[in-house]
Amino acid sequence: MARMKGLHATAIFAFCAAVYFAAPMRLVMDSNYSMLLGESLCRHGTFKLDRYFQHPERHWPRAMATTNLTYHVYRHGGHIYYCYPPGSSVLSIPLVLAAKAAGVSPSHPRNGYDAGGELKIERAGAALVTALAVTLLFLAARGFLDSRRSAAVALVTAFASGFFSTASRVMWSHTWGVCLLAAAILMLARAATGGRLRPVLLATVLAWLYFTRPTFSLSIIAITVFVLVRYRREFLALALTGAGWFALFVAFSHATSGHLLPPYFLLGGTMSLQQFLAGLSGTLLSPARGMFVYSPAVVIAFWLAARNRRTLSQPGLATVAAIATALHIVTVAAWPIWAAGFCYGARYGVDFVPWIALLAALGWQAALARGGRDNAARAISCLLIAVSLAMQTIGAFSESAWRWNIEPDSVDENSPRIWSWRDAPFVRPFEARK
């Protein structure tokens, strides 16, 4: 049985990685310079990017050339540092080394930065890391379902969510984030089904989850409270390990920014409830960024868990998943930039997709235990999955859907476009064929 599980996991990983890599759309936005930082760390052992910014105007085509620093980096103490969370860059060092052996590098001897090399590494890395996340979720689902149904949960997650249109495109901070969260969920699932919880390893995964993307602190809090309630003997080891990692991170932050936390990690202070309702409706239902618009299949997971709540085998895990998801949605809604800048669909919603997969597995298991057939529910579920697959495929394959962000003008400068159903991103590919 273990061998068959391994074969199934390998097949799912290979299939997802191949499809992710083949899908053509990949625009490097916020993740520019992330692989360059990885190269700086493995070649020179430093977070300082000074050597690559002697001529920043050479980093981009002439139309974009400027001697000013881009928003991806900042100065501190006379040195240049990467602005975004460092976790993805550190975790991607093996990818950078493998690319280097293949003759691909994000650096350029004359220009300092090679955007083409960066894209090649991010393209392969995002496909592999997201495929790994899907595989980990398959293994987590196997604790509650048979291989066929677990594969179904994993593959719907892979191609009917932002895994396909966002996480697997390039190395967004979401990419390593969902992989680490999937690993944490797998550990919790195995502990819940008779395995042993490994608090030191879990705390290390959660620490790097935070280093990769601070928004995941919501999931970290939910998991930590769950461990305190459910596994009290293991909590002290979890807390001490987490505190150790956080102390190291504070030391890193003080050395690179002079603050307790890096600049990006302090952005949470700008959240506001003044436009919360607009942010909530936009996050869930807007034609440009709505989770229920681009991945309506998530409704299936909520419905299964809610309808079969009394027969859930792991109500504690389901509660953690629901709370973490709700906290994330509320936080995104309170964020002034809830529309997530230049992207496709519900980019910020990618962070809680692993929790949705867990809810789906638990809810499906409970539905099977409950018995009975509901043909109407099955038909609706198939329809929601089909719509989600179509929406996410557009984001992974259509350039015109992505160009919606800048045509006819920047969505950042003309935010009402987010609410237009006539000119939604998913409509653009069909307009181009008229």
Image: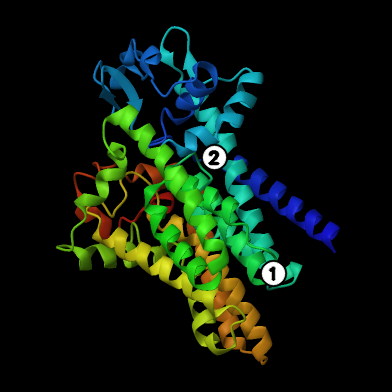
Give above or below for 149 relative to 2: below
Quadrant of res 148: bottom right
Q: 382 or 193, which is in the foreground?
A: 193
Check the picture and name the quadrant holding the N terminus: bottom right
The outermost residue toward the top is: 110
Quadrant of res 197: bottom right
Q: Earlier in the sequence, mark 2 or mark 1?
A: 2
Q: Is residue 65 left or right of residue 270?
A: right
Residue 207's tag is none
Residue 24's tag is 2
Residue 127 in view of the camera: yes
Q: Residues within 10 Å of mark 1 (few under 14, many from 20)?
A: many
Residue 166 in view of the camera: no
Q: Residues within 10 Å of mark 2 (few under 14, many from 20)?
A: some
Under mark 2, the amino acid is Pro
Q: Where in the figure is residue 333, as x and y percent of width and height?
A: 27, 62
Q: Where in the figure is residue 341, as x and y percent of width and height?
A: 30, 46
Q: 163 or 369, which is in the foreground?
A: 369
Q: Where in the figure is residue 368, as x and y percent of width and height?
A: 67, 84
Q: Where in the figure is residue 255, as x and y percent of width and height?
A: 33, 28
Q: Is residue 264 left or right of residue 381?
A: left
Give above or below for 213 relative to 230: above
Going 51% across and 42% down the picture, which residue do you hit? Answer: 169
- Mark 1 residue element: loop
| Distance Cα–Cα, label 2 vs label 1 | 34 Å
For label 1, the residue is: 143
Under mark 1, the amino acid is Gly
> Between tags 2 and 1, which lies in front?
1
Q: Is residue 432 left or right of residue 12?
A: left
